[in-house]
Image (cartoon, grey):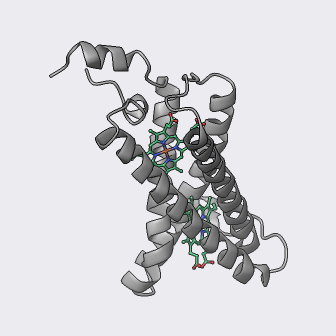
Amino acid sequence: MSGPDDTMRQAVRYDGGTISLHWLNATLALGLWLVGTFLEDLVPKGTLRSGIWSAHFDLGFVLTGLVVAFLIWRRAGGRNLPVEDPGPLHRLAKATHAALYVLLLVIVGLGVANAFVRGVSLGPISLPQVGDPEWRRSLTHWHGLAANMLMAVALFHAVAALVHHYLWHDAVLLRMLPRRS
Ligand code: HEM
Ligand code: HEM
């Protein structure tokens, strides 16, 4: 059911590019974290496990492009909305968003570097092996650590969005959701 209130809220939604890129980035980041964190424990060594790792690398490159596209879009074409709630909470939200962007960039940077150090294959394309293979261990360590930090910050960010929606009844979450037909 929609009412006049919904119509008003729809007017302040983010643009389609921002909404699509936000949810694609969020879904891929969560999926890659689940694979990176649980694969070795859940799937025995073999072709299935290495196939899923390859998917992590392929989708990792896709996410790298999407993160860059999201950043460029937010600064160039994306709609900027008026601040719902100015004051210290606004500064906290801004800092959280900045932390999400920085962590995403660190993770994809270390992931891509590691993919070259390992010389992995992306479908039919084999990446040239670059650098010292010994770097793999520390690149994986910092990549995994930053991935865990991303999930912690994203959890805080998601809880904040749900608090806005369910406790404070404002439009902060609705404006990042696709328009209902
Ligand atoms: C937000 C996005 C991503 C998340 C959350 C994520 C998460 C993870 C996690 C948790 C691990 C396991 C780390 C460990 O064992 O300590 C891992 C490993 C790895 N990831 Fe990612 N990853 C992401 C994006 C990428 C990207 C963009 C690439 C590069 C194309 C990539 C390439 C790798 C590589 C090469 C490994 C190491 C595998 C190994 O040497 O055992 N990841 N990732
Ligand atoms: C890994 C998961 C996620 C990442 C990396 C992420 C990242 C981001 C970033 C970077 C922004 C700022 C966009 C900008 O203005 O430039 C943002 C905004 C937003 N996100 Fe997420 N997000 C994630 C998950 C979620 C989830 C699960 C929810 C909801 C439950 C959510 C709700 C929102 C909302 C409502 C905004 C707009 C806030 C506002 O208008 O001030 N996000 N997100």
Q: Quadrant of the C terminus?
A: top left
Instruction: Indicate which quadrant contains ligand 1.
Output: bottom right
Foreground: 134 or 123? 134
Which residue occupies 63% across, 31% down?
A: 74
Q: Quadrant of residue 7?
A: top left
When the figure is inspected, residue 126 is found, relative to residue 170, above or below; the finding is below
Residue placed farthest to the right in the image? 131
The answer to whether residue 43 is visible is: no
Residue 16 position, x and y percent, is: 46, 25
Q: Is residue 20 left or right of residue 125?
A: left
Foreground: 120 or 137? 137
Q: In this view, does 174 lie to the left or right of 50?
A: left
Which residue occupies 65% across, 53% down?
A: 99
Q: Quadrant of residue 67?
A: top right
Residue 42 position, x and y percent, is: 37, 82
The answer to whether residue 17 is visible is: yes
Residue 8 position, x and y percent, is: 34, 14
Which residue occupies 49% across, 66% down?
A: 33
